Image (spheres, rainbow, N blue to C red):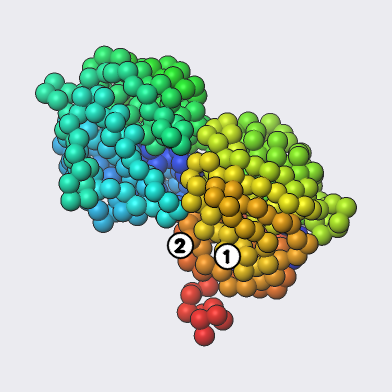
Amino acid sequence: MIEGGHPLDGTVKVAGAKNAVLPIMCSGLLSSGSLRITNAPQLSDVNTMMAVLRDLECGTERNADGSVTIQPAKELEACAPWENVRKMRGSVTVLGPLLARTGKAQISLPGGCVFGVRPIDLHLKGMQALGARVKIEHGYVIAEAPRGGLRGAEMYLAGSMGPTVLGTANVMMAATLAKGKTVIHGAACEPEVEDLGNCLLAMGAKIKGLGSPRIEIEGVSQLGSADWSVIPDRIEAGTYVLAGAMSGGRVRVEGCKPEHLSALIDRMWEARVPFDVGADCIETQPYHPRDPARRPRATDVTTHPHPGFPTDLQALWMALMTLSDGISLIDEQIYPDRYMHIAELSRLGAKIRRQGNTAIVQGTDRLSGAPVMASDLRASAALVLAGLVADGTTEVHRVYHIDRGYEKIEERLAGLGAVIKRVDEKDTPSDN
């Protein structure tokens, strides 16, 4: 429940990156010892991954200091069942390390947010290039390494939608224990992939080219124990920056890496949103978003793989553009069907229409509160941001989506001055 119209003011510190911590947790399967992960965010997806790893006979523990310890058993279970894997797409990243460690893997096809088809064919292509026999039966990926283990290979992993982030992570983990050299062409360059690679290096892997489209991995016989601190979440940072920009308040987002958000920063300059950038912070500056002379300028974005504009910020940018002065175009090149938030933003008074991969947003000077339904993680955050500036009260339903990627978002926004609270669905007015 959100009462709109209250400018935000204050400081918020960014948590660890969801999209980095999940594959890093899976990399613990490769260790002959234990992996201690600090700056691990308190998210439902992290809890789900802990459950997936426990299904594989891998010990997991959330420590008193907030860190997570991954301790694989000497004999791992090779099957990750549907019950937990279905909850999020990131679960598929147990495939590579499990196959490399045990020589076999049986993984349920993953679930997660529903905004179009997201096949895992490039993951399977990579495992096959390493010598594995792969088939899909009864909703499971069944993979088996050749006698003697996986073998290094040269492969191209980018597909029609560009490089695969989770596919690069999966193959890179599998290749750390493969015999010989593996070269991944068309590798994802996202900071989260680089963070995983640096964690693997700390465990004893041999990897070159992290952060570039060409990654080389020289296989080793085993990986050891390590401590690793997860990078800050660039999408969470961008969310709070855009929340400050939409409300016209002074919001200082600390503990982030502005270089990870260069595309967002570029678009914000273009949109004439006042803000400052520091070494590890971004701070929006006060302005009146409804002043005709100060409204954000309509600014087009096209989503691309890193370092382009992130698809995970597309819905949030659209929320900002609903208040812009003019007409903006948002072109979704990564997941063309990632537009389920359009109908819900329209319920708040936004003027948006879709043509193919493109959303056309005509800015308006006001939104009005209404009950809305979250369809996926980033769409739910966009609806919350829109509710912060809408007249009256906005109810965002199905907020379990937002808990997958944002740590206590209502408490952190309330700390910035938002009038927001979480209530049981049965207690909301629209359900009475």
Residue 106 position in % (x across, y down): 19, 42
Kind of residue at badge 2? Tyr
Indicate which label's residue lies in the foreground, 1 or 2: 1
Determine the secondary structure under disc 2.
loop
**Residue drawn at 46 percent across, 41 percent down:** 19
Give the residue furthest to the right.
Answer: 293
* Left or right, 287 with reference to 95: right
Give the residue furthest to the left.
Answer: 147
| Residue ID for mark 1 | 344
* Left or right, 164 with reference to 282: left
Q: Which badge, 1 or 2, is on the more N-terminal residue?
A: 1
- Asked whether residue 197 is in view, the answer is yes
Quarter holding the N terminus is bottom right
Displayed quadrant of residue 233: top right
Determine the secondary structure under disc 1.
helix
| Residue ID for mark 2 | 400
Residue 3 position in % (x across, y down): 68, 70
- Asked whether residue 34 is in view, the answer is no
**Mark-to-mark CA distance, 1 and 2:** 17 Å
The front one of 130 and 421 is: 130
